[in-house]
Image (tube, rainbow, N blue to C red):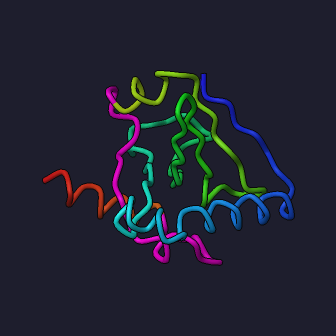
Amino acid sequence: MVEIVRMHRKDFAALLAGAATLWLSRQALVEHGKRVTVLVANPAFNDAPHAQAAVVLQQGESEEVGVILNSPGEPALVLWQPGELAEELKRGLWLKLKVPPDSLFRRDTAGLWDELLLAAQAVRK
């Protein structure tokens, strides 16, 4: 099962700054085409911690980690076991798309899930 890790705001800020530095480095921009991968919870995904979640995905060689951008309260990480995210994608729990970083990293995340859901649905058509 997916593990959610609660973080203190200062730890989250440090993590986010590090991730943003990596993603926005010159090589990362070339590799990712100036976009980051985001997972949008499918409306049918009724798992309470993930309902209406917007998750920035960072994939390593053997691990997949996500930062929930619009989590109520404290920011949270999502850690998937090997193969677990692929199975969740196959089951349709998440919609996956690439978006410009500036459309995600903002103070007010109200409406973020709705915006990303519309974008993900438009891509699938």
* Closer to us: 24 or 94: 24
Query: Quick one: 15 or 105, which is closer to the camera?
Result: 15
User: Going 53% across and 22% down the picture, which residue do you hit?
Assistant: 82
Q: Is residue 22 left or right of residue 94?
A: right
Q: Which residues are magenta?
A: 90-112
Residue ID at (43%, 68%): 29
Residue 2 versus residue 12: which sits nearer the camera? 12
Tell whether position 94 is magenta. Answer: yes
Image location of residue 60, percent across then percent down: 54, 38
Q: Quadrant of residue 79?
A: top right
Q: Is residue 11 above or below residue 44?
A: below
User: What residue is at 38 percent from the left and 59 percent from the top?
Assistant: 31
Give the image quarter of residue 100: bottom left
Residue that extends furthest to the left in the rendered view of this protein:
125
In the image as oriented, which residue stretches furthest toward the front?
27
Rendered location of residue 87, percent (x, y): 40, 23
Residue 11 visible at all: yes
Q: Quadrant of residue 69?
A: bottom right
How many callouts does the rendering have? 0
Left or right: residue 4 compared with residue 87: right
Q: Which quadrant is the N terminus positioned in?
A: top right
Above or below — where is 48 with respect to 20? Answer: above
How far across and down, in percent of the image, does residue 2 sit? 61, 28
Q: Is residue 111 visible?
A: no
Lateral position of residue 120 relative to residue 19, left or right: left
Residue 55: give x, y in percent of width and height. Answer: 53, 52
Magenta run includes residue 42: no
Front one among 109 and 65: 65
Residue in the image at 70% along x and 37% along y: 4
